Image: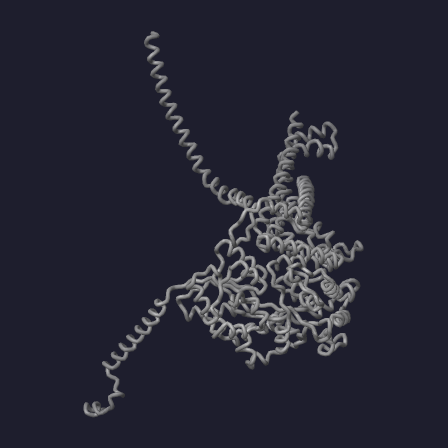
């Protein structure tokens, strides 16, 4: 037992007196109050901002965007975001109606091919690239593929912050290749003739019924008709419009391209255009279910293949190669992408917050890649050299497809063009209509739409 | 006596007048209440039905992209429609669809009602089963029929024993529209069967008994008793089925997307595409006005035919 002297002799720091405990508790309490108060005053210091933000649905891309926006709002409690998403094909229509009725969101993701319409009608606001973290407009444009960023700029101003941007690839079922004695690497088709020949060998028929189609062109939606026909047309030396804006899809190059498009079914008998189980949400379904050995598609996340065909994903017995071309090794695909944009109808303070939010969303491109691979991003910096990205199987193919692909036509009558081409392809492929006559009809339809747009 | 009676009559007359004015006031109040009760409905229709209809008609004379303000273009939208082969083809598709579906819905609906009304055992259960087609969500119906009408789907399999190897129901321009009509009839005929059945049950048995006594055959009884007695119902079914078909959208939109080519595109689809996909709301409104005119003309013709029949019957 210690006496009073010895107690006093104990160093003061070690002594736990009631007064010290109370003082400590008081200090801790005061600290907590001050801390809370400072957070409160920070939150109160900024005016509350309510934003609406729309995007398209996709099992990887939409959740990643939602995650990043939530992180941003967690860090900025004064900002509330009403995050909504719509089916891929409906987003443009929803936005049009939104602008018409004054209910358009302040921020949204715009598909690349809608940019000309938004820009022409003055519906989206120019962006301050310095607020997005770029020192100058030159620094901004040099961080993206020139062709893509061109679609998002007008009169030296940026109107879109490029997000994803990717090219299409030819997806092969390598098991099918091996089954018919083909090498998926060496025999991967490099020309359109080779595509027909290889597809023919891969085709399996039971009487008049296809058990397996060698190759499959998508027939389910105008958007896919455009994406799949675009590189064939450009590769054949054609173009969608001439300098005066007249639709030229029905010229000799257009007919040549459509003849190639039709040859897989007509000449090689390797596909049945009427026989498909593809649906708008899953255009690749025939390929997933091994009813088609080859299919042109955007980068497909492994998780999606795993969900649809676990065997194919786990072995794996698929690979991605570049499109065939009119000359070996000169094939290229369609590319398209997405921009984060700001409505011109949004107030100035909301526009500023959206700049900050977009900068935050795009501040971790590696996180974006990890959540949405293999959808490549539009920006060049900050992710391609990351080991996680480099380790992704066939990464170089995705990058080549992105960098060498050709854009979908940027026109003010894109929807009319897509619908006209879809009708033409259906007539040619399903009803064996004459190619030239069908393309003439499509071109006339597009010219009428262009004239109507110009008339206003 | 007369001197006494005259003031009394005058007094009674004045009281009657007072009563009358009170009665008039009460009637007026009752009428006001009536107006008050129907006013919400009238307002609802004015604001949400006739107002938008009139606005759509006004829009059809403008160019409107849903972004900038509409501007007057006169009859330009109507002129461009006449010159547009897609519109002409779509209009023809719509007329074929309305005609084909209405005739078949009426015939099949009447046939089913006659079959059910024969009181064959199990007929009522069959009726319930058939009516279930109306309770299914239309989206599900369309998706199921897409698979049934696949080139190697159930419909083709059913025809296989008859030597039919394959029919491209939805991808050939010659079969796509009949296939859509088939689905429409499958969906709506049982609904109108119930309407016909109600009409059949309302025909007094005495008429049939009298016809039998007169030696009328079953066909004659149908021709001279059932059909005349069902005329109002028949008129109702034809008009309602035609109006229903004129507005059809989801079936061709989901099952064929209007294809192949333009083979199954109907006016309501074209209105949707023109308005919301091409942002030409003025032109879309003009197409709506054309569709509305078709429906009005059709209804008017039906009414004329019905009235003439009624007059002839009464004579």
Question: Which quadrant holds residue A198?
Answer: bottom right
User: Which quadrant does the N terminus of chain A fall into?
Assistant: bottom left
Percent position (x, y) of residue A27?
27, 78
Q: Is residue B148 visible?
A: no
- The residue that appears at 64% across and 47% down in the rendered structure is B81
Position of A140 relative to A425 (above/below): below
Percent position (x, y) of residue A410?
60, 63
Q: Is residue A7 visible?
A: yes
Percent position (x, y) of residue A271?
74, 65
Question: Which quadrant holds residue B222?
Answer: top right
Residue in the foreground of this view, choosing between A300 and A50 = A50
- The residue that appears at 59% across and 60% down in the rendered structure is A89
Residue in the foreground of this view, choosing between B250 and A150 = A150
Position of B193 relative to A196 (above/below): above
Question: Which quadrant holds residue A289?
Answer: bottom right
How many discs mark residues in the rendered view?
0
In-image side of B308 versus A431 (left or right): left
- Looking at this view, name the residue that lies furthest to the left: A4
Residue in the foreground of this view, choosing between A119 and B312 = A119
Percent position (x, y) of residue B7?
33, 12
Colour style of the rendered protein structure: one colour
Residue in the foreground of this view, choosing between B7 and A335 = A335
- Looking at this view, name the residue that lies furthest to the top: B1
């Amino acid at each position: 037992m210690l006496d009073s002297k010895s107690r006093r002799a104990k160093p003061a720091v070690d002594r736990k007196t009631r007064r010290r405990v109370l003082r400590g508790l008081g200090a801790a309490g005061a600290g907590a109050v001050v801390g809370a108060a400072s957070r409160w005053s920070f939150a109160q210091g900024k005016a509350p901002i309510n934003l609406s933000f729309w995007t398209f649905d996709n099992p990887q891309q939409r959740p990643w965007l939602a995650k990043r926006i939530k992180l941003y709002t967690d860090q900025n409690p004064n900002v509330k975001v009403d995050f909504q998403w719509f089916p891929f094909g409906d987003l443009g229509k929803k936005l049009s109606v939104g602008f018409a009725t004054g209910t358009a969101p302040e921020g949204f993701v715009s598909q690349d091919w809608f940019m000309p319409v938004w820009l022409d009608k003055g519906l989206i606001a120019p962006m301050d690239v310095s607020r997005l973290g770029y020192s100058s407009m030159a620094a901004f444009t040099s961080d993206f593929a020139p062709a893509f960023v061109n679609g998002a700029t007008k009169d030296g101003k940026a109107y879109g912050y490029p997000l994803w941007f990717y090219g299409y690839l030819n997806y092969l079922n390598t098991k099918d290749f091996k089954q018919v004695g083909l090498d998926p690497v060496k025999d991967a088709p490099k020309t359109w003739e080779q595509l027909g020949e290889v597809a023919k060998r891969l085709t399996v028929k039971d009487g008049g019924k296809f058990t397996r189609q060698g190759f499959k062109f998508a027939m389910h939606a105008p958007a896919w008709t455009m994406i799949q026909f675009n590189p064939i047309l450009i590769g054949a030396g054609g173009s969608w419009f001439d300098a005066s804006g007249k639709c030229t899809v029905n010229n000799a190059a257009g007919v040549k391209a459509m003849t190639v498009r039709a040859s897989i079914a007509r000449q090689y008998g390797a596909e049945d255009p009427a026989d498909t189980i593809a649906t708008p949400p899953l255009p690749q379904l025939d390929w997933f279910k091994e009813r088609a050995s080859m299919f042109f598609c955007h980068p497909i996340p492994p998780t999606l293949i795993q969900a649809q065909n676990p065997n194919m994903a786990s072995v794996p017995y698929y690979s991605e190669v570049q499109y065939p071309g009119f000359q070996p090794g000169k094939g290229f695909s369609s590319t398209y992408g997405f921009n984060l944009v700001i409505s011109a109808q949004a107030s100035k303070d909301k526009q500023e917050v959206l700049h900050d939010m977009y900068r935050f969303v795009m501040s971790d491109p590696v996180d974006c890649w990890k959540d949405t691979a293999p959808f490549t991003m539009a920006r060049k910096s900050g992710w391609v050299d990351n080991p996680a990205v480099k380790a992704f199987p066939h990464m170089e193919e995705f990058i080549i497809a992105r960098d060498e692909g050709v854009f979908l036509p940027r026109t003010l009558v894109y929807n009319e063009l897509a619908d006209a081409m879809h009708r033409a392809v259906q007539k040619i492929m399903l009803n064996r209509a004459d190619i030239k006559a069908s393309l003439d009809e499509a071109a006339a339809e597009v010219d009428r739409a262009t004239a109507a747009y110009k008339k206003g | 006596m007369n001197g006494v009676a005259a003031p009394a009559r005058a007094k009674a007359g004045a009281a009657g007048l007072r009563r009358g004015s009170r009665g008039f006031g009460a009637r007026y109040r009752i009428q006001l209440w009536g107006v008050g009760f129907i006013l919400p409905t009238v307002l609802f229709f004015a604001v949400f039905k006739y107002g938008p209809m009139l606005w759509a008609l006004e829009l059809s004379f403008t160019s409107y992209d849903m972004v900038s303000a509409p501007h007057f273009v006169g009859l330009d939208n109507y002129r461009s429609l006449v010159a547009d082969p897609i519109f002409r083809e779509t209009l023809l598709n719509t007329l074929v669809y309305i005609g084909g579906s209405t005739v078949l819905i009426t015939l099949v609906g009447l046939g089913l009602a006659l079959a059910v009304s024969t009181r064959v055992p199990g007929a009522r259960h069959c009726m319930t089963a058939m009516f279930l087609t109306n309770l299914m969500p239309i989206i599900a119906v369309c998706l199921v029929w897409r698979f049934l009408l696949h080139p190697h789907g159930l419909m083709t399999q059913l025809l296989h024993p008859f030597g039919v190897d394959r029919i491209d129901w939805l991808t050939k321009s010659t079969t796509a529209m009949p296939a859509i009509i088939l689905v429409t009839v499958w969906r709506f005929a049982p609904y109108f069967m119930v309407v016909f059945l109600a009409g059949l049950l309302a025909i007094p048995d005495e008429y049939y008994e009298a016809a039998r006594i007169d030696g009328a055959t079953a066909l004659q009884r149908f021709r001279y008793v059932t059909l005349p007695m069902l005329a109002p119902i028949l008129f109702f079914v034809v008009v309602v089925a035609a109006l229903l078909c004129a507005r059809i959208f989801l079936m061709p939109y989901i099952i064929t997307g209007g294809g192949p080519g333009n083979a199954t595109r109907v006016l309501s689809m074209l209105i949707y595409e023109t308005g919301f996909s091409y942002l030409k709301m003025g032109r879309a409104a003009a197409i709506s006005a054309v569709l509305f005119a078709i429906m009005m003309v059709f209804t008017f013709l039906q009414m004329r035919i019905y009235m003439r029949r009624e007059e002839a019957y009464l004579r």
